[in-house]
Image (tube, grey):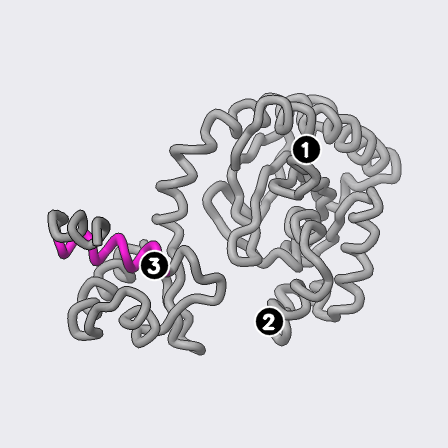
Amino acid sequence: MKEENNNKSLHNPTFRVIKILEALDKSLEGLTLSELSEKTNTPKSTISPIIHTLLRKDYITLDRSTSKYQIGMKSFLLGLSHRSSNSIDIIKKEMEDIVDACNEVCQLGILVDFDVFYLAKVDSEQPINLVSSVGKKLPAYATALGKALLSGYSDEQIKNYYLDKMKPITDKTITDMNTLLGQIGQIRKGELAYEFEEINKDTGCLAIPLKKNGKVIVSVSVSFPLYRASKEKLKLIKKVLLEKRRIMEQLINQLDLEF
């Protein structure tokens, strides 16, 4: 009763927007218009224009194959900019050390709806063309960063999510679930994640997952053109990433960093 009384003092149109975003935030698979109407206890005719506006402004997204809405990138970025800018700055300093040691591009990413969302990037002095960039999302199964992040999920969760979603991006993209799970199993044992030309022609990438209280929350990678991927260079990148993993995980846990 007290909550109902409190709600009566709120601005109804604004409150409806909040209820819609909160309902979508709680749903992993997304919600249809009918489900949103039921969850928010609001007629479809009332929430439909709100949904249309949020969709047009990228605060929510629509999967047209399922007619389900999900939280969009702008909503995500609003929360992200508030809670993690300091964390990114701290880890970025370690990424700069990685670039100094390897002279290759270093990137930081998290998992958003089983896609890699790129949080930060430190460029090297050497030229390299990448399809990834800060603020962009790419399929996790086709990237080293993504495979590192997927290592924090069970095989069953990965199977249930992807089902028939593993589409080839290049002719080297892994689309076989058993092959992907085999690689992820090795990452869980402490090996580096890797991909070669799966997302971008003529480039490769090595990555490590970083854990907070034993849970994978973010990953760091080094990307390079394949013509520079000598055995010596790959050995150096692996050595530097493994050394930095210990340091970065200590920072994440000791300083209670959020991403």
Relative to 106, does residue 69 appear above or below in the rendering? below
Q: Is residue 121 something one can see in this rendering? A: yes
Identity of the residue drawn at 25% across and 68% down: 41
Residue at the front extreme, as displayed: 1
Q: Amino acid at mark 1?
A: Glu
Q: Amino acid at mark 3?
A: Ile
Q: Position of residue 232 (x, y in %)?
A: 87, 34
- Closer-to-camera residue (99/180): 180
Q: Amino acid at mark 2?
A: Lys
Q: Main secondary structure of the magenta part?
A: helix
Q: Earlier in the sequence, mark 2 or mark 1?
A: 1
- When asked about the image quadrant of residue 42, the answer is bottom left
Identity of the residue drawn at 78% across and 27% down: 243
Give residue 60's mark: 3
Horizontally, residue 213 falls left or right of residue 52, namely right
Horizontally, residue 233 falls left or right of residue 65, namely right
**Local crowd size for mark 1, using a 10 Å CA cut-off: few (<14), some (14–19), many (≥20):** many
SS category of the residue bearing label 3: strand
Q: Position of residue 215 (x, y in %)?
A: 66, 42
State the CA–CA distance, disc 3 to disc 1.
35 Å
Residue at the disc numbered 2: 165
- Closer-to-camera residue (73/251): 251
